[in-house]
Amino acid sequence: NSSSVSSILSTSRQYDQTVVTDLGDDLLRIKRRLRVPQYMIGMKDVVTGHDLVKWNGVYYLFYTKFTGSGYNIRLVTSTDLKNWSDFKEITDYTKTDTTYNYGNINPSVVKSDKEFKMYFQAYDSKYAGSIIYVSTSVDGSIWNTPTKALGIVAGTACSKWLGCPSVIRESETSYKMYFIGYNGTTYVVMMSTSTDGITWGTPLSIVKMSIK
């Protein structure tokens, strides 16, 4: 069976805002995921905390779904942004991490020359802590076991919590991840770099946030 959405991409742009800040030779591009709206896919599923990637004429929509006891990431595909495939569950929150085992949320996906890389946040039931994982796939359908990309770092702005990753692939040897960190008192937009999209450097603070 297929399901239909009316212009999901143009609708999502009204809410899934992108903050662009000039950093000299760089651009900071962060998707605001705190108030992402929910979309129904043909009354079959709810789309929230999502990312959209186009490859070889196919749109891959990755999104967060509450399963009844926790959150997983699902995938649907389309060639016209109107007719969508049945969903495929591509994470299992009960197996991702023994501590942060309540949900896998907020996917950010990039496509390199050889594979997809999906970054997502795993968190505990009290939302008191979370870390960022990465999983890879050659075809976007079958995914490898997730590995930890970034965790909390003592003495930094992400010493208590980090999440909402947004990853930019500049080249096959240059990746940048922007995310939100929390040290117990202040939320900060942070950034880390990688040469392969798998192993990441020490996070740097970029912008202090004001959340009311």
Image (spheres, rainbow, N blue to C red):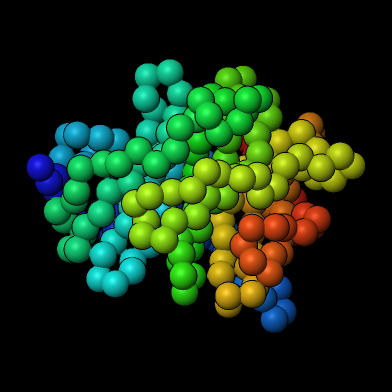
Instruction: Tell me which corner region of the image, top left, top right, bottom left or bottom right, holds residue 167.
Output: bottom right
Horizontal side, residue 40 vs residue 94: left or right:
left
Task: Residue 122: tell me if it is visible.
Answer: yes
In the rendered image, residue 149, in percent from the top left (x then y), is placed at 66, 49
Horizontal side, residue 41 vs residue 174: left or right:
left
Horizontal side, residue 41 vs residue 52: left or right:
left
Q: Residue at x 33, y 66 (%)?
A: 54
In the rendered image, residue 38, in percent from the top left (x then y), is placed at 33, 39
Whether 63 is drawn above or below 6: the answer is: above
Q: Could you tell me which quadrant the C terminus lies in? A: top right
Residue that lies at the very extreme toward the bottom in this rendered image: 25
In the rendered image, residue 52, in percent from the top left (x then y), is placed at 37, 58
Instruction: Tell me which corner region of the image, top left, top right, bottom left or bottom right, holds residue 148.
Output: top right
- Front residue (pair 90, 54): 90
Instruction: Tell me which corner region of the image, top left, top right, bottom left or bottom right, holds residue 23.
Output: bottom right
Whether 200 is drawn above or below 132: the answer is: below
Whether 107 is drawn above or below 21: the answer is: above
Residue that lies at the very extreme toward the left in this rendered image: 1
Whether 36 is drawn above or below 44: the answer is: below
Q: Residue at x 56, y 56 (%)?
A: 166
In the rendered image, residue 113, in percent from the top left (x then y), is placed at 47, 74
Q: Residue at x 76, y 40 (%)?
A: 152
Q: Could you tell me which quadrant the N terminus lies in? A: top left
Q: Residue at x 71, y 64 (%)?
A: 193
- Front residue (pair 104, 6): 104
